[in-house]
Image: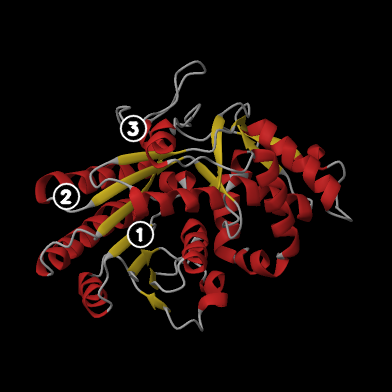
Amino acid sequence: MSRNLLVTGGAGFIGSNFVHHWCKSYPNDRVVVLDALTYAGNRGNLAALEKEENFRFVKGDICDRTLIDKLLQTENIDIIAHFAAESHVDRSIIGPGAFVQTNVVGTFTLLEAFRQHWQTNEKPLNYRFLHVSTDEVYGSLAPNDPAFCETTPYAPNSPYSASKAGSDHLVRAYYHTYGLPTIITNCSNNYGYYQFPEKLIPLMCINILMGKPLPVYGDGKNVRDWLYVADHCSAIEVVIQRGTPGETYNIGGNNEVENINLVQMLCQLMDELAPDLPVRPSQNLITFVKDRLGHDRRYAINSNKLQTELEWTPSVTVEEGLRLTVEWYLAHRHWWEPLLSEEYQTYYHKNYLQSAS
């Protein structure tokens, strides 16, 4: 039986990768992408799908209840895959209001609309509301602390993670109060194709190509668990297919790396793969800058529940994934160059150049 999916934020980084993954895996399903095309959304990410009969793109805001109601009804949506979010910690420190509006109010709007749609259609058992969240809601780990699991208490430390925690609580409440078939996933740091240049890995790749400093916060020893975006997409597919409503599933890459070591790995790959670099070795561009406010020291994800109950495991090591990612950015200069806009340059200057030490 074919399904009708509404993918919010489907022109963004993780969302567009998921849309490509789903359309390739389930060509008979209809996929409707809703995206506001803010600075990090790029309709060009979906260009290869635009002419497909079972694909539709809609520009719009997840806070627009009238639009959501219309899409759910006219497209007969039975699955919402909710990726739309303001997601960059640095931007949440500079301007937290947009994070509360999109991540909390937007998620509430979707939940209310989907609840009405589900109830109007007599609560079908196959309906799902898949909410994509982050490991940052759990707070920060000490070096020897066990990895985050699904029962780890929430302790968000940035406006971004607090807004995602709020949306998680709403999603959970809608299951327990109304029986709405919601599922939450909390993932570790993603990387891969179509990631906006403000994030660490594309930022470093692009700055190396341009001979610009590589800004590293503090001492560079903050630890993140890196998840290749294609692995994340396959995990979400499994959760939609076989996950239990009301449950939370953590998705990690089993790749804990200190930030400074990650940057050094990228430098080595760029030195190997990129001809005619302005500065070589590119490691000479590493510049330590003032640490981010409230910077969490370490994140780590325990994915045992997902691996045991739904038989999913990550397939890409960080070494393999970084090489694929660097190769993609080298081959897609036409994609990222237009994104280095005046607004982006202003943000970059405010966030990094004023913090150089």
Mark 1 neighbour class, 10 Å CA radius: few under 14, some 14 to 19, many 20 or more: many
Mark 2 neighbour class, 10 Å CA radius: few under 14, some 14 to 19, many 20 or more: some
Q: CA distance from mark 2 to mark 1?
A: 16 Å
Q: Earlier in the sequence, mark 3 or mark 1?
A: 1
Please tell me the numbered disc located at residue 150: 3
Residue 40 can be seen in this image: no
Q: Position of residue 313 (x, y in %)?
A: 51, 40
Q: Position of residue 267 (x, y in %)?
A: 77, 41
Direction front: furthest residue: 1
Q: Earlier in the sequence, mark 3 or mark 2?
A: 3
Quarter of the image that includes the N terminus: bottom left
The amino acid at mark 1 is Ala
Q: CA distance from mark 3 to mark 2?
A: 18 Å
Tell me, yes or no, whether the two marked residues, 3 and 1, touch with CB atoms within 8 Å: no
Q: Position of residue 86 (x, y in %)?
A: 40, 54
- The residue drawn where x is 27% and y is 52% is 104
Residue 106 appears in which quarter of the rendering? bottom left
Quarter of the image that includes the C terminus: top right
Q: Position of residue 101 (x, y in %)?
A: 29, 56
Q: CA distance from mark 3 to mark 1?
A: 20 Å
- The residue drawn where x is 10% and y is 51% is 178
The amino acid at mark 3 is Glu
- Identify whether 289 is placed above or below 78: above
Q: Mark 1 highlights which residue?
A: 81
Relative to residue 278, is residue 244 drawn left or right?
A: left
Please tell me the numbered disc located at residue 188: none
Q: Mark 2 highlights which residue?
A: 174
Mark 3 neighbour class, 10 Å CA radius: few under 14, some 14 to 19, many 20 or more: many
- The residue drawn where x is 47% and y is 30% is 296
